[in-house]
């Protein structure tokens, strides 16, 4: 049953007033944000792994420096987002424990391998492209700390997207082998990128309530459509073929018709059965365990400082 407080809260959302950390909010609103921001933060952290895989093998010093900067940005985004989630009453340690135990979700996309250098181009172009499409509207999210975090994150994501497109451009203007490598990367990353937007609207569990609360501004299918409309002309410009036989311009709707992603694959990846799920979790757990001595050192130092201050 809706209480007076719930009604006032909804009215505030409808007037476009931002909700801040100390404001009253329904428990469901808080839980939904912790879930979404937590998953988003984990995605940024785990998302470092597929690209980190290529830092030592980037083809030039310049590409290496750019990739290193990009991966560091993702770490920064993760930390920002953990802070935003912490304003809702969960600690970063709790969220980390959920991730390491395999209980927390992170974006399905990061469970696919980066097999060639062209994959780094495809990830920047498509994965960061999809991330921006999803995150630009989140800058207007009703929860203040999340919406403000999104503003800076989106600026950095646009740099990431351009660096990815630039790798693809260079490969496509290169030798036949290089262009074939770019095409192969597009073939493998296209469908997983479309899945980033989440299940189709009819199967989306949270969209309706999240949109009512102003947490999401668009449905999953709306954003997927926008992404296809933006990306297909870019693929054409590169001289690459989008691996979808059903792709066709639809004059009436002013957008592309396109095929259905393989939702069975999507749900298998969510269940932990994607190509790299186990590797990703093992890598995060190893990083956490390897960092134990450093965390212990920090704690010991903090305790010593407190003792000194108390004397
Ligand atoms: N992967 O009811 P809905 C990045 C889950 S960008 C895994 O539609 P919702 C940048 C969903 O959680 C990637 N799980 O859910 C980068 C729910 O499960 P639950 C991260 C997915 O929340 C680039 C269930 O399916 N971006 O990291 C996925 O309304 C390059 C039902 O779905 C964000 O997280 C999926 N793809 O809509 C970093 C953006 N899709 O929780 C490094 C913020 C759905 O009930 C390198 N998040 N699920 O157990 C969102 O906008 C939303 O959470 C959606 C899903 C749109 C992802």
Image (cartoon, rainbow, N blue to C red):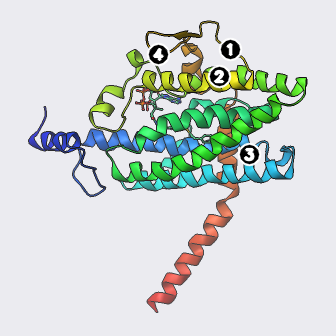
Kindly identify which residue carries mark 3: 52
SS at mark 4 in the image: loop
SS at mark 3 in the image: helix
Q: Which mark is residue 243?
A: 1
Tell which tag, 1 or 4, sits nearer the viewer. 4
What's the CA distance linking mark 3 and mark 4? 38 Å
Q: Position of residue 15 (x, y in %)?
A: 20, 43
Q: Give neighbour class at mark 1: few <14, some 14-19, many 20+ (Cα, 10 Å).
A: some
**Residue drawn where x is 31% and y is 44% of the image:** 142
Kindly identify which residue carries mark 4: 254
Q: Nearer the viewer, residue 117 or 155?
A: 155
User: Which of pointers 3 and 1 lies earlier in the amino acid sequence?
Assistant: 3
SS at mark 2 in the image: helix
Q: Position of residue 109 (x, y in %)?
A: 61, 30
Q: Position of residue 237 (x, y in %)?
A: 70, 25
Q: Give neighbour class at mark 4: few <14, some 14-19, many 20+ (Cα, 10 Å).
A: few
What's the CA distance linking mark 3 and mark 1? 27 Å
What's the CA distance linking mark 4 and mark 2? 21 Å
User: Which of pointers 4 and 2 lies earlier in the amino acid sequence?
Assistant: 2
Kindly identify which residue carries mark 2: 190
What's the CA distance linking mark 2 and mark 1? 7 Å
Report whether 82 appears left or right of 45. left
User: Which of pointers 2 and 3 lies earlier in the amino acid sequence?
Assistant: 3
């Amino acid at each position: 049953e809706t209480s007076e407080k719930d009604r006032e809260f909804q009215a505030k959302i409808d007037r476009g007033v931002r909700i801040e950390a100390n404001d009253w909010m329904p428990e469901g609103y808080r839980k939904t944000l912790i879930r979404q921001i937590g998953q988003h933060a984990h995605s940024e952290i785990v998302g470092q792994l597929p690209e980190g895989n290529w830092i030592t093998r980037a083809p030039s010093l310049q590409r290496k420096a750019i990739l290193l900067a990009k991966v560091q940005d993702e770490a920064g985004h993760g930390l920002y987002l953990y802070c935003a989630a912490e304003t809702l009453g969960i600690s970063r340690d709790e969220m980390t424990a959920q991730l390491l135990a395999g209980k927390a979700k992170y974006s399905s996309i990061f469970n696919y391998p980066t097999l060639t250098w062209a994959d780094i181009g495809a990830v920047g172009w498509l994965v960061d492209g999809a991330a921006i499409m999803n995150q630009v509207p989140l800058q207007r999210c009703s929860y203040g700390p999340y919406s403000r975090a999104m503003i800076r994150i989106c600026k950095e994501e646009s740099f990431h997207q351009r660096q990815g497109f630039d790798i693809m451009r260079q490969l496509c203007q290169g030798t036949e082998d290089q262009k074939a490598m770019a095409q192969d990367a597009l073939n493998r990353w296209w469908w997983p990128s479309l899945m980033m937007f989440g299940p189709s609207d009819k199967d989306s569990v949270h969209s309706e309530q999240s949109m009512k609360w102003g947490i999401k501004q668009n449905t999953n299918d709306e954003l997927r459509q926008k992404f296809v409309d933006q990306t297909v002309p870019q693929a054409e410009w590169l001289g690459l073929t989008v691996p979808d036989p059903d792709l066709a311009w639809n004059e009436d709707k002013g957008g592309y018709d396109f095929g259905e992603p393989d939702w069975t694959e999507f749900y298998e990846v969510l269940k932990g059965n994607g190509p790299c799920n186990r590797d990703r979790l093992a890598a995060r757990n190893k990083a956490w365990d390897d960092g134990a001595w450093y965390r212990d050192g920090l704690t010991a130092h903090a305790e010593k400082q407190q003792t000194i201050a108390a004397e």
